[in-house]
Image (cartoon, rainbow, N blue to C red):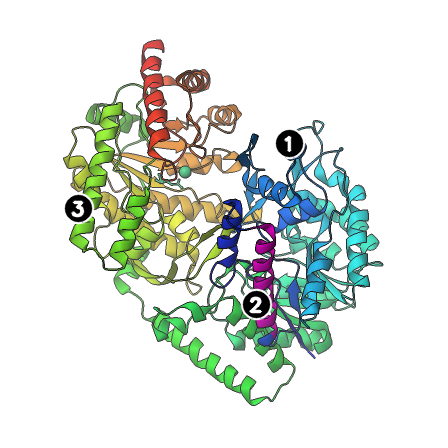
Amino acid sequence: MVLSSVLGFPRIGVNREVKKAVEAYWGGKISADELTKVSAEVKKYNWTNVKAKGVDLVPSGEFSLYDHVLDHSASFNVIPKRYLGHGLSALDIYFAMGRGRQADGVDVPACEMKKWFDSNYHFVVPELSDETDFKLNFNKAVEEYNEAKALGIETRPVVLGPVSYLVLGKPAREAKPGFQPISLLPKLLPVYKQLLAELKAAGATSVQIDEPILVLDTAAYLEKQYATAYSELVPVAPKIVLTTYFGRLDSNLTFVAKLPVAGLHIDLDRAPAQLNATLAAVKPTSLVLSLGVVSGRNIWKTDFQAAIKLGQKAIDTLGSDRVIIATSSSLLHTPVTLSSENKLTAEQKDWFSFALEKASEVAVIASVLSGSQDAQVTALLEQNKKSIAARRAFETNSNDAVRKRVAAITPEMLNRKSPFAVRLEVQKKHLDLPKFPTTTIGSFPQTKEIRTTRAKLGKGEISQAEYDKFIEKEIETVVRFQEKVGLDLLVHGEPERNDMVQYFGEQLDGFVFTQNGWVQSYGSRYVRPPIIVSDVSRPFPMTVRWSSYAQSVTKKPMKGMLTGPVTILNWSFPRADVSREIQAKQLALALRDEVNDLEKAGISAIQVDEPAIREGLPLRRSDWDTYLTWAVDSFRLATAGVTDTLQTHSHFCYSDFGDIFPSIQRLDADVISIEASKSDMKLLQTFKEYGYSNEIGPGVYDIHSPRVPGEQEIKDRIAAMLEILPDHLLFINPDCGLKTRGWKETEASLANLVAAARWARQQF
Ligand code: GLN
Ligand code: ZN
């Protein structure tokens, strides 16, 4: 019989209960016990509903109040010293590591967060050194396994594997130079042995051990570590299903297939082509193969026929007892359930599958493959056939004008009229900015008033005209403030935007929006990505009205503000029937029209933000060039249609460009702004080494904290930057937008920034 399995379920609650409870706990409004009660309810909902959909292997242990990697660190006693000795409870230490703590005389920043592979989820990075004193503080896997069992539900616990856990970590501050976290494997394995032995004793028959780093190039160097780890763990553990996702095993398959584990899970959503090689490799072994045929990363309904074909192929080679039908990865990256959506049309709703619906999909596919003649299964199979056919029919309804435009993109459309050196001179004259021009990254404080006024418009309590008037007033306030404080290149402040991607998605054709399609980004921060469903085009200008209004109330130059094509794509659920490249180019053409319209409206600088360009980087090095080519081309397509006098800007929230440096240069933005206040100046050094030639504004202070940077501090930063960067190319700005800040600190910080820039003009 073919079993079905779900690798992990969203842990936010069907109505974001976990966010609400966690934030209430942080605010001192509920107790730890009440928080535990909410968690228990959410876990119960997940287990009972996944089970009710007919799934055989229901996951447990992957629930989290903040982040699952942080859960492992807390459980393994990987707790940096700075969080200890303040008299905090274990739970408060846990949250302090996740988000920092500034209360009652305790002032500790959060641990570093990193993107979870190529997703928009962030994990808390473990800090490791030779002093790390691993021990099992608590056994979350056993606790949750028992919790589910008490509800009458047998689950398969999920644990992050020891090799991935260490490789995802970083050297702690006290680590010796050259220290490598993986060197701690022998010290960590006893803890895993204890964890898994306790799980076995509790009655778990199998365990899902995630080793996602197996889809990275780096895993090729870890063959020995994998062999050691799993030969030690297998004898004491329940049956291990070694789980990989988000990519392909490639050459790592050779050693993975030899590990003494009971099963292997591969991602056939992201890497369907790896099925043949995997079948060949596991055939002579006794491994059970878990096929990730239901995507854990997108929201599209699975094509049952296609999935069944893959499953049948595996059965033909291995026999049905050695095949599991599964989600490709945890469903953490999808919203909880489609049944919360009331505004999608019936046609649209029929295209999608969220986490709960995906749980049903694995169960149905597995039943069919097991030869089920059940009438309900047959009906669901028929229904799926119809849904898929309807979606395919919709997909053939392309917007021919858009398709033709993409096909007609010429190399000239990607190039500015003149090279940067020429543009620099023209723009200096046209914009008439002083040396070391000051500017900001776009948004100004999104006050409560702005948010409630937008909510009122949504509820129909005020008219569109009233709302627009309100936004104009906000823009004028922001402009007057910038004039008063003495900034040089102004912005309108983005008060009209609910979100930098959603705002554009709502105005473009080709997107749909959910009401409750929340996905965890990090901790209690959830996002609701728009969904691209068809060819993208721009029916009307999107920002021209606001930028022109802002320009009309000042004589200083106004910078238009757009989100770039790659960022809109990466922070949306893309369509599955058309490549990401085509979708990025369609977005780029829509933005190109917007950029050109802004120029026509008298705007002389335009910033196109691309903070997500790096996170879209493929996991395998060999795929980078293809991605970077179309990603950079898309940015150029969006921005190159203007005359030489128009100054293009781009913004990134980071500065460790490392290997993608040539691509940043190839964007050919006249000015880029990057984060540089948290990371040391070493990163600017890289810019120098690579010979970056265009203008650059390394952030002079960190906007992520309410702290006001002193004038002297900013002067010192500018002086340090000028040791590295040529003075005729330097812009002075904060390191990101100000939307999450209050007005008070914004005013004080920007006054100091302007004063420091004025000083620099005298000094250098
Ligand atoms: N222009 C945007 C802002 O200032 C940029 C946001 C971002 O970099 N994530 O808010
Ligand atoms: Zn930013």
Q: Nearer the viewer, residue 169 or 58?
A: 58
Question: In the image, what residue type sits under mark 2?
Answer: Tyr
Q: Earlier in the sequence, mark 2 or mark 1?
A: 2
Question: In the image, what residue type sits under mark 1?
Answer: Arg
Tag on residue 82?
1
Tag on residue 45?
2
Queried whether the magenta region covers residue 47, the answer comes back as: yes
Q: CA distance from mark 2 to mark 1?
A: 37 Å
Residue 362, percent from left and from top: 58, 73
Q: CA distance from mark 2 to mark 3?
A: 45 Å
Mark 3: few/some/many CA within 10 Å (<14, 14-19, 20+):
few
Residue farthest to the right, as pictured = 235
Q: Magenta segment range?
A: 31-51
Q: Earlier in the sequence, mark 2 or mark 3?
A: 2
- Residue located at (83% from left, 53% from top): 232
Image quadrant of ligand 1 equals top left
Tag on residue 469?
3
Question: In the image, what residue type sits under mark 3?
Answer: Lys
Quarter where residue 351 is shown: bottom left
- Left or right, residue 32 beside residue 464: right
Q: CA distance from mark 1 to mark 3?
A: 49 Å
Q: Nearer the viewer, residue 697 or 618?
A: 697
Queried whether the magenta region covers residue 605, the answer comes back as: no
- Left or right, residue 308 beside residue 634: right
Q: Is residue 353 above or below residue 181?
A: below
Q: Is residue 311 above or below residue 163?
A: below
Residue farthest to the top, as pictured = 763
For the C terminus, the quadrant is top left
Residue 624, percent from left and from top: 51, 46
Residue 719, percent from left and from top: 43, 15
